[in-house]
Image (tube, helix red, strand yellow):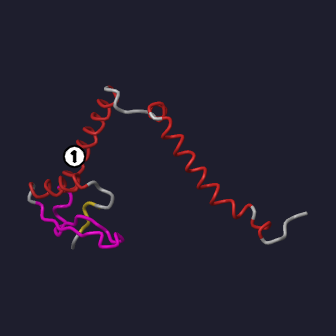
Amino acid sequence: MPVMLFKLNGVPDDEADEIRALLSQNDIPYYETSAGNWRISLAAIWLNDEDCFDQAKKLIEEYQTKRSTQAQQEYSQSEAEGNNLSFLNRFLQEPFRYILYLLVVLIIIYFSTIPFLYFSDWLGGGVK
């Protein structure tokens, strides 16, 4: 009976490709289902043989541990080099841009709420 091994929804393409390659290199037969045209189905990698599940799960866990460690190292290195900027640093680099964004958001909120605030005045009534 088929067993689901790995969900692909939200998984980056490079990670999914590496999982497929890992399974192929270890001669673990699998098949894949897609999310469909409307992205409402389950995109996943499935195994035909339940006997391979434990081996495949162990391989994927080792791969994900290695990938996580590598990502943490890259982040730490990037942070040490000063490439990771905080919001305050980004604001200080381009203050006009962020002020402009804030003004646009405030204008959108104003025009979205003004009809509700003055609705009774427009009907000719109003509290007197």
Name the residue located 16 percent from the left edge and 68 percent from the top edge.
Answer: 49
Q: Which residues are magenta?
A: 28-55
Q: Residues within 10 Å of mark 1 (few under 14, many from 20)?
A: few
Observer-nearest of 62 and 8: 8
Name the residue located 8 percent from the left edge and 59 percent from the top edge.
Answer: 27
- In this rendering, would 107 be left or right of 19? right
Q: Residue 31's quadrant in the figure? A: bottom left
- In this rendering, would 122 be left or right of 78? right
Observer-nearest of 122 and 1: 122
Name the residue located 32 percent from the left edge and 35 percent from the top edge.
Answer: 75
- Height in image: 74 above or below 111? above
Q: Position of residue 4 (x, y in %)?
A: 26, 66
Q: Position of residue 84 (x, y in %)?
A: 37, 33
- Identify the residue under disc 1: 62
Name the residue located 28 percent from the left edge and 66 percent from the top edge.
Answer: 43
Which of the image's four quarters has the N terminus?
A: bottom left
Which of the image's four quarters has the C terminus?
A: bottom right
The residue type indicated by label 1 comes to Glu
Q: Look at the image and say whether residue 47 sits in the magenta stretch.
A: yes
Callout 1: SS: helix
Q: Look at the image and say whether residue 54 sits in the magenta stretch.
A: yes
- Height in image: 62 above or below 82? below
Disc tally is 1
- Height in image: 109 above or below 123? above
Q: Position of residue 9 (x, y in %)?
A: 32, 61
Q: Position of residue 18 (x, y in %)?
A: 18, 52
Q: Residue 123's quadrant in the figure? A: bottom right
